[in-house]
Amino acid sequence: MKALRTHAVGGPETLTLDEIDAPTPGKGEVLVDVKACAINFPDTLMIRDLYQFKPERPYAPGGELAGIVSAVGEGVTGYAVDDRVMAGIGNGGLAEKVVVPAGRMFPVPEGVSFEKAASLLMTYGTTIHGFKDRGHIKQGDTVLILGAAGGVGLSAVELAKAFGARVVAAVSTEEKGQVARNAGADEVVIYPKDEMDKAASKELANAFKAACGPEGANIVYDIVGGQYSEPALRSIAWEGKFLVVGFPAGIAKMPLNLTLLKSCDICGVFWGAFTAREPVKFKAQVEELFQLMKDGKIDPLVSETFPLERGGDAIAKLESRQAVGKVVVTM
């Protein structure tokens, strides 16, 4: 079988397409013929050794996949050969076959493509956990979403609307703004791509405040970080929740006096650790996502697909912050 693997620390150009032996499922495991593997921001970090988890090399990146069961290990119940499944596995998805613990899998809902199934767990899973467990979202909230046109960002737009919130989408271009509007955003703010000085940062904060309204944002969903976090924090409502999700623009240094002035909370959203620590709640949230998809309230946007041999290009596209929606590698 073929697998796109990292052998040394580096960017996506260092990945190599290797011919390796197919794995065999052990006790409690299932062998999946991978049909689609979605690319996520952790994939860009892991191959550079910049992520919390550092798997032993060589390994294939790709933590979110969908495919068909081709073999079932000892003790596995509920799955059979030829079942259509989806899974979140951390890494290993950029391969033609992968062994998956049965407890990390879910059946692909009827009528859902492999590409869309592979795009659901990490993005929408992160967001439903962030909104419900960390942000305590409620009907009528105003939610400011940074990076609102990416995979996680669009999941936030859709889920916030599904939960009855008003959405302010912050993006870097008007084109991405239209993508966010198409997903249901009520307001769009375009932020600058270039380095901001103090005056520009204040101007952006004022733009966020104007879009969020006089009460401010009850929830700030920060997928971007860097120079955009402080202006967003300045637009937060009294007792608002600032949810820290990712840092493609860098790790922000936040003026903590603002948390006192707004009596607000800065909360981390670490979905991977949550799924391991609270598997029952995690599975219940995935079932809720399936129902929302069935009801037509969420629908992953797959903007581009790449073949396995070009999986490095897919990672590079996400790393350069050019991707809209989800980028998926297909087998």
Image (cartoon, rainbow, N blue to C red):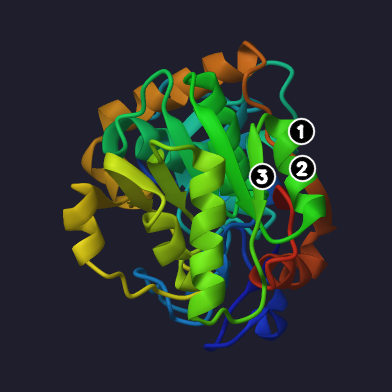
Please report contact status of discs 1 and 2: CB closer than 8 Å, yes or no: yes
- Name which residue type carries label 1: Asn
Quadrant in which the N terminus is drawn: bottom right
Specify which label sits upstream in the sequence, 3 or 2: 2
Residue closer to the observer: 14 or 326 = 326
- Residue 96: x and y in percent read 69, 54
Is 321 on the left-hand or right-hand side of 215?
Answer: right
- Residue 32: x and y in percent read 60, 42
Local crowd size for mark 2, using a 10 Å CA cut-off: few (<14), some (14–19), many (≥20): many
- Name which residue type carries label 3: Val
- Residue 108: x and y in percent read 61, 25
Does residue 157 appear anywhere in the picture? yes
Is 261 on the left-hand or right-hand side of 271?
Answer: left
- Residue 266: x and y in percent read 26, 53
Task: Determine whether 237 is above or below 175 in the image.
Answer: above
The residue wearing badge 1 is 182
Gap in angstroms between the C-alphas marked 1 and 2: 5 Å
Observer-side mark, 3 or 2, equals 3
Q: Give SS at disc 2.
A: helix
On the image, which quarter does residue 231 sit in? bottom left
The residue wearing badge 3 is 188
The residue shown at (57%, 71%) is 44
Residue closer to the observer: 154 or 235 = 235
The residue wearing badge 2 is 179
- Name which residue type carries label 2: Val
Is 37 on the left-hand or right-hand side of 79?
Answer: right
The residue shown at (70%, 35%) is 116
Gap in angstroms between the C-alphas marked 3 and 1: 11 Å
